[in-house]
Amino acid sequence: YEGVEPGMDGTPGNYNFKTCGIELYNLKEDISETRILNEQYPQIVEGLSQLADSFRIILGDRLNGQLGTNNREPGRLGFKKEQIEHLAIGKIPSLENKYNNKYSAGGEKALTDGKAGSLDLFDDRWMGFQGDDVIATLNMDKESDISEIKCNFLRNQNSWVFLPKSMTIEISMDGANFNEIFSEKFDSEIENKEAKILTVGKTGLDFKAQYIRITAKNIGPCPAWHPGFGNDAWLFVDEIVVR
């Protein structure tokens, strides 16, 4: 919060973002972390880096999208986690924009793993995009009969997570020429602090397709009424369901 006004009543204010690398400090003498000691103690930097890497293998690291070998699902009360069966499970989508590593959910495969996200935005099932749109293309490997396509989005405005301002679904036989079969717009910037999962899509379809492209538009900066006004909003997406 250096140089910016903090929030109030539990709502965060604007953040002052800075970029840093691996930095060594003496917290006993420099609690504010103002003097980087990497050059004076390179052996300590190397030793701590190796120790951290060994823990990342076991525990994972959300910042670089690494899953740990000894992870388990967190046990949180009050949030229902749903398992879904559908045709796209295991069909890893290609993404035009990179998700933020803080909310990777384990990478692209998370969007079609049959595990739907809950109202808990930290349940490691939601993929987060900060300021960017979601443009995901699925290859079903062969011509398939399609009757339903839908996708889930999370709203948690207290955490800067907004629903998309629009979503479209397109299908193709060759992966190059797409036809739009569904489009919907949303009043995503209206203030509503209630957490919600929105399922968007269409049932009752009668199409044949090999490729499916879903485009969800991020609202961009947080709206004027929001404490994060001017900063990029988050768009959280999870399971893409195809039947």
Image (cartoon, grey):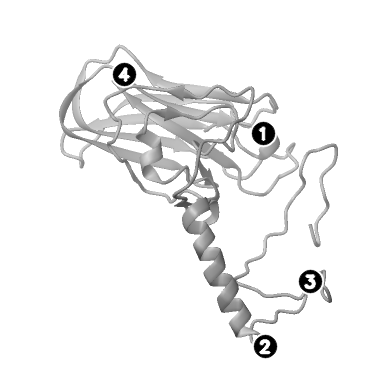
Q: Residue 37: horizontal and vertical position, in percent?
A: 69, 82
Q: Nearer the viewer, mark 1 or mark 3?
A: 3
Tell me: 76 left or right of 112: right
Q: Earlier in the sequence, mark 1 or mark 4?
A: 4
Report which quarter residue 42 is drawn in. Answer: bottom right
Q: Earlier in the sequence, mark 4 or mark 3?
A: 3
Mark 1 residue type: Gln
Give the labeled residue for mark 4.
Answer: 148
Cα–Cα gap, marks 2 and 4: 61 Å
Cα–Cα gap, marks 3 and 2: 15 Å
Q: Earlier in the sequence, mark 1 or mark 3?
A: 3
Q: Residue 204: horizontal and vertical position, in percent?
A: 30, 11
Give the labeled residue for mark 1.
Answer: 157
Q: Earlier in the sequence, mark 3 or mark 2?
A: 3
Q: Nearer the viewer, mark 2 or mark 4?
A: 2
Residue visible at 83% across and 52% down in the picture: 5
Mark 3 residue type: Leu
Tell me: 47 left or right of 225: left
Q: Earlier in the sequence, mark 1 or mark 2?
A: 2
Mark 4 residue type: Glu
Give the labeled residue for mark 2.
Answer: 40
Q: Residue 170: horizontal and vertical position, in percent?
A: 30, 31
Q: Is residue 218 above or below residue 118?
A: below
